[in-house]
Amino acid sequence: MGTTGRVPGRLLGSGRTADVYEIDAGWVLRRDREGYGDAAAEGAVMAHVRAHGYPVPAVRPPSGSRTDLVMERLDGPTMLQAFVTGALDAAEAGAVLAGLLRALHAVPARHGGPEACVLHLDLHPDNVILTPDGPRVIDWGNAEEGAPGLDWGTSAVILAQVAVSAEPIAAPAHATLTALLTDPLGLTDEGLAEALRRRAANPTMSAAEVGLLGAAGELVRSFMGGADG
């Protein structure tokens, strides 16, 4: 595309590490500001899961840039925006997230053995866009292959951090977590422990967010029947 290093179009939104710009009709450019990601690798994962019917945006072939990923423009609010405005019930959001995790873990791994599956490792309400054709999952920069317990643990911990915080959406986050873990069989002790370790080491998290991890972990463990090993 030749867009690296210049502003390609109107800024549509910004996250912790990336900005999204309008480019051609029907397409957007997601540009990493911090240098954490690998756009070509992320696009390859998205193309793989999309080829197996998983709901992700289409992506264009890699441009050779580690920071720039061109993908299909999606119309609709994020799941977080929808339940903040009352357009989506928190329990329904949790059920949708659980369904998306199960569907993803049915996608065969690209490189791993028969026991491995594709993991998103950042699947939460702000990374699901509710389009007229159904939910679409974005932000695949953390994706890897492995055991599904880590993915369930990661999504649960992200929700639990909000649920134990003083944020205005703490109660809806708790309801979403409860719905996500209605059937907690996807959770494992090993997956939860690794999810907590990775969240603590995440450079984009604030000290206050890291400080919530102890209480968040205990909340998630309560859905596992209090098991600790």
Image (cartoon, grey):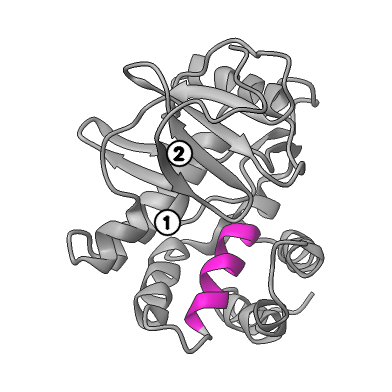
Q: Is residue 57 left or right of residue 214?
A: left
Query: Quadrant of residue 170 in the image?
Result: bottom left
Q: Which residues are magenta?
A: 153-163
Among the two numbered marks 2 and 1 on one chain, the one whose residue lies closer to the N terminus: 1
The answer to whether residue 167 is seen in the rendering is yes
At a point 20% along the width and 34% down the height, the residue shown is 132
Quadrant in the picture for the C terminus: bottom right
Residue 215 image point, x, y percent: 64, 87
Residue 133 image point, x, y percent: 23, 30
The answer to whether residue 108 is seen in the rendering is no
Give the residue pinned by disc 1.
125
Task: Classify mark 2: residues with Cα within 10 Å, few (<14), some (14-19) or many (20+).
Answer: many
Residue 137 image point, x, y percent: 45, 38
Give the residue pinned by disc 2.
137
Residue 118 image point, x, y percent: 65, 33
At a point 57% along the width and 27% down the height, the residue shown is 107
Quadrant in the picture for the N terminus: top right
Task: Classify mark 1: residues with Cα within 10 Å, few (<14), some (14-19) or many (20+).
Answer: many
Instruction: Using the image, determine if residue 88 lies above or below residue 136.
Output: below
Viewer-nearest residue: 39 or 104:
39
Residue 129 magenta? no
At a point 52% along the width and 86% down the height, the residue shown is 165
Q: Amino acid at mark 2?
A: Val
Q: Mark 1 falls on what kind of element?
A: helix
At a point 63% along the width and 27% down the height, the residue shown is 68
